Amino acid sequence: MRPTLSPALAALVVSSLCTLPLATQEPARAVGANGAAKASAKGPAQSPAPSNSALPSDMLPVPGGTFSIGADPKTILDAIEKAFPLSEEKRLDEVTKLYAELGRKSVTVVPFFMGRYPVTNAQYKVFVEKTGHRYPYHWWAEGRKDDLEQRRDAIKAEFPSAKDPYMPYWERHWKELPYAIPSYNGGDTPGEDCPVVYVSWRDANAYAAWLGMRIPTEYEWVWAASGGEPKQYLWGDDPKANPIKRGTKFDKMWPVGHHGDAAVGKFGHGHMQLGVYEWMGEIGFYAFDAAANQSELEKLFKEKLFKGKDSPRLQKALAYRPKFAGEKVVVKGGMFGTENGLDLRIWTRAATEHFQTASALGFRLAKSERPARDYLASLLKLDYDWSHFGGTRKPNIADQTGAERYELGGDGKLVQAYHAVSLAPVSHASDDEKSSIDRLMEATVEQHNPLALATLASTEKLAEPALEPGIYSLCFRHSGMPKPLQDALAQASKDLKLAKTKAGKGELKLDDVSGEWEAPLKRFGITKQDVLDGKVDFVRIGAVKIPTDTHMWVVRNAVGEAVATFPVKHRPETKSKYEEPASLVVDERDSKHLNFVFGVPTIPEARGKAYLVKLEVKLAEAAIDNNWRIAGK
């Protein structure tokens, strides 16, 4: 019952993370008269934190900065020896956990926002109730233990060979089961303000998209925890100096904020350790730098830790290699039951399968400064098929534009509703260096494959084109009737008219009429009945008719199906020098009318050569007023 990767998610893994809002991919902010970031006497250079005046108040601003991530052999050895000073055997057993950190890399984090605490059960419950999304396993298994007990015999009968049949039963029947937020610690701790757990990476991204947010990247999380300082733990370098007071039992779940200032990161984010492990935003567990990781690993093997007595532990440590994998995701923070000090290090990189749900695995939110960027970015991690984009083309989140508005509760924290319209151009128009706009336009006609130029997502219903809220691909089709279809229509018309004449008053059986023209008709979505009905001045993709006498936008839904068309008012223009960012302008006379302008590079690394695209969209009910945050304003 484990979910598999959708085509879109698989494409995301294969294409790495270059289109998502990673910490190193937004342009650096100019700060001060000379545009330089201000250096702190206590750490790496920082750029100013953004303002969160229009966002939930528990989204704390984080300044940008550049710092070094990763480790060298000395750092690894120091950490392992401080964690287990009296046992070489333990050091050999545990050191392999740190191999994935080897290889330093300089990274830049742009200003962003991150949740003060991990998402709680109470916050997640609002999402579940409003969207019908799957609730966490323990809300049934522990929150409604009475129901589980009543079903115990039926559960075991349905999964007779399963060692633990209860989670598979929940995975299959969760829509039918009751749920309630459980309490913890023997019923003494109400669960509403405890971190939500048993959420997969996909669940976390769905929640984030619903709020117009995303999950922080590993770079961002480490930066928020450390401020770029090389300390190993929130409190310093000594694992035994942990200021969090703990009793004899380590397996207690506590409400967010329970640890007070003892588990707070550099910029005020709490519960960053001994709360729950937290999903990171990128799918894929890789070295920071593959070549550097291998080189530093070889250096590590020459150090004193590996020169002792030959033993099975030593051989295991020497043979081990990090298990990097495209479908795994880094988790960080160390959970409430963590006893091993290494797991509490800021830099330790644990990883798990993206579909995993566990009793100590939760998440917190992050948000970029640019309005509605994260709404689209999180949706792209869910079900969105861009296989029709072709080649290496993909949505270019780095050039996204849009607008958003939050409706907040009286405390400024609880989001009552989120509204957004967001567009990202395609990364480039073609992989063919010899392509031109004319050739691309001709291909949309002859190859019956409209050219995908943008991804549009909206929480609002649209009037033009007529679309429900969701995520869509916008594809351009040039006017014109394909020559093969013209020829096929002419012959089909003759054959069908002749067959109709022969049938006379009898019933014409279309299946009995055939010819070489059938294949072209079928390719372009034309039926024999269409030919009999009269002039064919359209083609079809799926069930959608596309007029051939004018340029048209063809809209595909999240799974790639054509669902709508609307006229193109501005044909794409070729520009030899165009590097302006995508923009959104709201019509002053009609605030429901939105004008998007964006450039699509002709090919990868086109250096200014682009196609200028102008797109007009109209909202059905909402209006973009001064309460909305608009990109560039």
Image (cartoon, grey):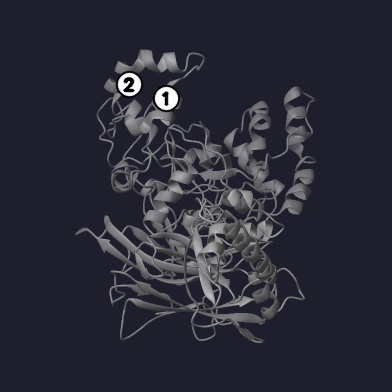
Q: Residues within 10 Å of mark 2 (few under 14, many from 20)?
A: some
Using the rendered view, name the quadrant where residue 88 is placed. Answer: top right
Residue sitting at 58 percent across and 52 percent down? 510
Can you identify the residue that label 1 sits on? 169
Screen quadrant of the C terminus: bottom left
Closer to the camera in the image, 49 or 143: 143
Label 2 sits on what residue type?
Answer: Leu
User: Residue at position x 44%, y 47% from top?
Assistant: 204
Q: Which mark is residue 148?
A: 2
* Residue in front for this viewpoint, 127 or 307: 127
Query: Is 141 situated left or right of 109 in this image?
Result: left
- In the image, taking residue 277 as reference, residue 411 lies left or right, namely left
Q: Whole-percent x and y of residue 473?
A: 52, 63
Left or right: residue 411 versus residue 372 is left
Pinpoint residue 96: horizontal percent, then vertical percent: 67, 36
Q: Would you say residue 22 is visible in this rendering?
A: no
- Residue type (three-letter) at the residue carrying disc 1: Tyr
Task: Tell me the crowding category of disc 1: few under 14, some 14 to 19, or many 20 or more residues within 10 angstroms, Cα based.
Answer: some
Q: Quadrant of residue 85?
A: top right
Q: Is residue 173 visible?
A: yes
